[in-house]
């Protein structure tokens, strides 16, 4: 039996199996690397860049970089967390993320990560994009104002549900968006179901089960019980 | 026919004095006064200078988001908006509330009445009432009250704190909780929460009784001034229970003409537009509602709030508050029931009622029940009305088949009182300012009249005392004749004119 391979993450030895990414190995070892677009059930997308670490002194996405024996990885350093806060601020101002009236509040990974990293203000001027709400489906509402383009819904619908309901479309900072695979572009004209995996994969408040709203009181929401750094390692 | 002192005949020839912003009220507004060369008052207006726009930007939002979103109108009385919206959306989802849901909402509402009334009386108005309307501005504030009457101030602070705790335990947070949802509530009280509130409630009832005695004593001591200050007659409106009792959470609309006769009674508020229309005026962002029966806002304006509720109901369904109501009604042959400062007395009677109602609810086992939600036949339209701390609050929504709000109309308590507040400050301007050289103390009389209504001018956040103030006397040519300023620290100055 060959010896367990390891790498250093913030000066701690982390074991890994061949083929695992830095993110997968860190999670298995109970170490939190902040992330938004990564989900253990799906292949890495590498778009949010929040999981950026320094590998032997060079920046890289921990969700896509394979772990290698003997590498030195910096994760929760002041420098990296500063950059993560800036990335979060850009995500917040790029969409319309109004936590006070958002039903995803308390269950939202974007909000929980911002709390965890100590983001105190949006810092940048808001874009205030004008994005429509798609309420055409009888059981599910889409509020694109909160989309962070993680593509998890695209993957879930394609790989888990085999329905291809969502896709990425458009170009540029203001043009890139999730599109719906129907002639009308409306969710109500697809075969999407509230029981689909894609219906519960959204880390923010875009894909919402209708008529639930604020049914869960304060104190019982996902991130009321533990911060993102604990919940995301445990799941 | 325009109101006396609403619009001067030749405003361009008059001196203009502005009180901006009005302090120790919720939100932001200003008062302008036009004076002739002999300082006689020719025009007085209360302007609301903010535009909110909630009715427009909730269009397109899913209906279940509304009770949480619209409560952001206000930082002081969000529970009222939270509950009025929830009541309207109960109709949209066709729900009849479970006993637990209704009682938890009532508990939340009485907590709100208690904390809001305590805040207004002790923090915002007691400096005027305890020290005098024209007293030294340096001490005419809550800090001055703490120094002069620490026990009174302490009880005020703790009464408010208790109300906030009731709100926290029923809605999840002291301010802007999520407890009330369309069709019910998302939590009831735990046994521990109930016990914690029960432990303090008898003290709160006792302190509320003392508060009523404070304002009653002030009326007895200053009878002539308190009865005449800003006094005017008006029509009135408020909710009453089916048996005529005061009910701040639910009931039918009762309106009385200024002569005391009944205009309508137990009117089903789900068609409020059959009895109320909203007028607009070019100089204010606030609408001017009036009774349809009087055809226009000049004749059909009315007042709402504690004074209306206490005088209109047949009785208050808690014994201590009802005893105080009877004394209030009988005091000096009923003179206080028409006094603008009578709002303070009525407000403290309501605070006592709220404390008693909380006590009763805390001994009702339904508040720890688990049946929280109900559903029914979906409707397109819902109207929710509640008696908020400042008066009747109306929320009206239409929701389409996709669950999105297509139309919203909100008539907040202070809007109903818009013309009444303008009337009060015009009377006070005539009584105290006419022909006099302006001083800070005299101008405060205008603010005292406004504070009687406890207005939430933007229904947004509250501005506590010591707001910067600049008053300038300008002649017909626009030349500044006199100027007084008050900075953020409450220091007044009369700078030399250039």
Image (cartoon, coloured by chain):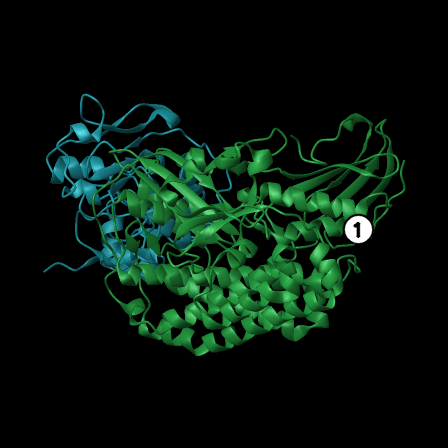
Chain colours: A cyan, B green
Q: Which residue is mark 1?
A: B442
What residue is drawn where x is 59% and y is 59%?
Answer: B120
Q: Quadrant of residue A45?
A: top left
Q: Along the horizontal axis of the image, is A153 left or right of B256?
A: left
Name the foreground residue: A177 vs B145. Answer: B145
Question: Dot 1: what SS?
Answer: helix
Name the foreground residue: B67 vs A128. Answer: B67
Q: Quadrant of residue B415?
A: top right
What residue is drawn where x is 32% and y is 70%?
Answer: B190
From this view, report whether residue B217 is shown above or below residue B449: below
Residue B154: percent from left, percent from top: 61, 72
Residue A235: percent from left, percent from top: 22, 56
Q: Along the horizontal axis of the image, is B430 left or right of A42?
A: right
Residue A54: percent from left, percent from top: 37, 47
From this view, report whether residue B22 is shown above or below residue B106: above
Image mark 1: chain: B
Residue found at the far top of this picture = A183
Residue B221: percent from left, percent from top: 73, 68
**Residue A125 visible in the displayed image:** no
Q: Along the horizontal axis of the image, is B308 left or right of A176?
A: right
**Residue A3 visible in the displayed image:** yes
Indicate the quadrant containing the N terminus of chain A: top left, top right, bottom left or bottom right: bottom left
Name the foreground residue: B111 vs B226. Answer: B226
User: Number of callouts in the render?
Assistant: 1
Q: Residues within 10 Å of mark 1 (few under 14, many from 20)?
A: some
């Amino acid at each position: 039996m060959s010896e367990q391979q390891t790498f250093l993450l913030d000066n701690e030895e982390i074991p890994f199996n061949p083929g695992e990414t830095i993110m997968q190995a860190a999670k298995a070892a109970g170490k939190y690397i902040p992330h938004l677009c990564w989900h253990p059930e799906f292949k890495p997308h590498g778009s949010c860049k929040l999981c950026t670490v320094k590998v032997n002194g060079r920046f890289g996405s921990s969700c896509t970089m394979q772990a290698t024996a003997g590498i030195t990885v910096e994760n929760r350093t002041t420098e990296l967390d500063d950059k993560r806060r800036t990335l979060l601020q850009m995500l917040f101002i790029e969409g319309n993320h109004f936590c006070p009236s958002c039903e995803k509040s308390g269950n939202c990974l974007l909000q929980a990560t911002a709390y965890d990293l100590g983001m105190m203000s949006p810092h940048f001027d808001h874009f205030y994009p004008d994005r429509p709400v798609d309420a055409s489906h009888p059981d599910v509402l889409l509020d694109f104002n909160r989309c962070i383009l993680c593509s998890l819904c695209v993957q879930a619908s394609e790989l888990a549900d085999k329905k291809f309901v969502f896709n990425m479309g458009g170009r540029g900072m203001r043009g890139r968006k999730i599109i719906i695979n129907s002639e009308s572009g409306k969710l109500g004209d697809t075969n999407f179901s509230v029981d689909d995996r894609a219906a519960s994969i959204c880390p923010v408040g875009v894909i919402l089960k209708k008529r639930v709203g604020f049914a869960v009181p304060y104190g019982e929401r996902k991130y009321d019980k533990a911060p993102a750094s604990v919940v995301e390692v445990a799941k | 026919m325009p109101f006396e002192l609403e619009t001067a005949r030749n405003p361009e020839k008059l001196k203009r004095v502005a009180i901006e912003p009005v302090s120790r009220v919720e939100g932001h507004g200003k008062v302008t006064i036009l004076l002739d060369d002999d300082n006689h008052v020719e025009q007085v207006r209360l302007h609301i200078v903010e535009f909110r726009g909630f009715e427009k930007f909730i269009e397109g939002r899913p209906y279940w988001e509304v009770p949480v979103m619209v409560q952001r109108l206000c930082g002081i009385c969000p529970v009222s908006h939270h509950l009025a919206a929830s009541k309207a959306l109960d109709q949209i989802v066709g729900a009849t509330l479970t006993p637990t849901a209704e009682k938890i909402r009532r508990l939340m509402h009485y907590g709100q009445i208690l904390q809001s009334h305590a805040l207004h009386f002790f923090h915002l108005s007691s400096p005027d009432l305890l020290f005098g309307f024209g007293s030294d501005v340096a001490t005419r504030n809550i800090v001055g009250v703490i120094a002069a009457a620490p026990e009174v101030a302490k009880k005020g602070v703790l009464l408010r704190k208790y109300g906030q705790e009731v709100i926290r335990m029923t809605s999840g947070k002291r301010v802007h909780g999520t407890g009330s949802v369309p069709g019910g509530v998302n939590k009831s009280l735990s046994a521990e929460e109930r016990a914690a509130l029960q432990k303090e409630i008898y003290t709160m009832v006792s302190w509320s009784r003392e508060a009523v005695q404070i304002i009653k004593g002030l009326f007895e001591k200053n009878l002539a001034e308190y009865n005449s200050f800003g006094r005017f007659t008006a029509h009135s409106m408020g909710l009453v229970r089916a048996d005529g009792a005061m009910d701040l959470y639910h009931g039918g609309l009762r309106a009385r003409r200024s002569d005391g006769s009944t205009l309508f009674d137990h009117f089903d508020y789900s068609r409020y537009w059959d009895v109320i229309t909203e007028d607009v005026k070019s100089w204010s962002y606030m609408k001017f509602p009036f009774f349809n029966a009087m055809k226009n806002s000049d004749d059909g304006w009315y007042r709402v709030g504690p004074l209306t509720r206490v005088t209109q109901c047949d009785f208050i369904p808690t014994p201590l508050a009802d005893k105080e109501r009877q004394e209030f009604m009988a005091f000096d042959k009923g003179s206080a029931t028409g006094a603008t400062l009578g709002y303070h007395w009525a407000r403290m009677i309501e605070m006592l009622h709220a404390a008693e109602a909380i006590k009763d609810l805390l001994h009702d086992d339904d508040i720890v029940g688990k049946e929280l939600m109900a559903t029914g036949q979906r409707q397109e339209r819902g109207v929710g009305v509640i008696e908020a701390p400042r008066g009747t609050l109306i929320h009206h929504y239409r929701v389409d088949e996709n669950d999105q709000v297509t139309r919203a109309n909100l008539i907040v308590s202070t809007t109903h009182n818009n013309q009444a507040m303008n009337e009060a400050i015009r009377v006070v301007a005539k009584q105290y300012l006419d022909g006099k050289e302006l001083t800070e103390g005299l101008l405060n009389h205008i603010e005292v009249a406004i504070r009687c209504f406890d207005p939430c001018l933007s229904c947004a956040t509250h501005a506590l005392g010591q707001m910067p103030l600049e008053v300038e006397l300008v002649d017909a040519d626009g030349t500044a004749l006199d100027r007084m300023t008050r900075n953020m620290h409450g220091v007044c100055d009369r700078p030399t004119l250039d």
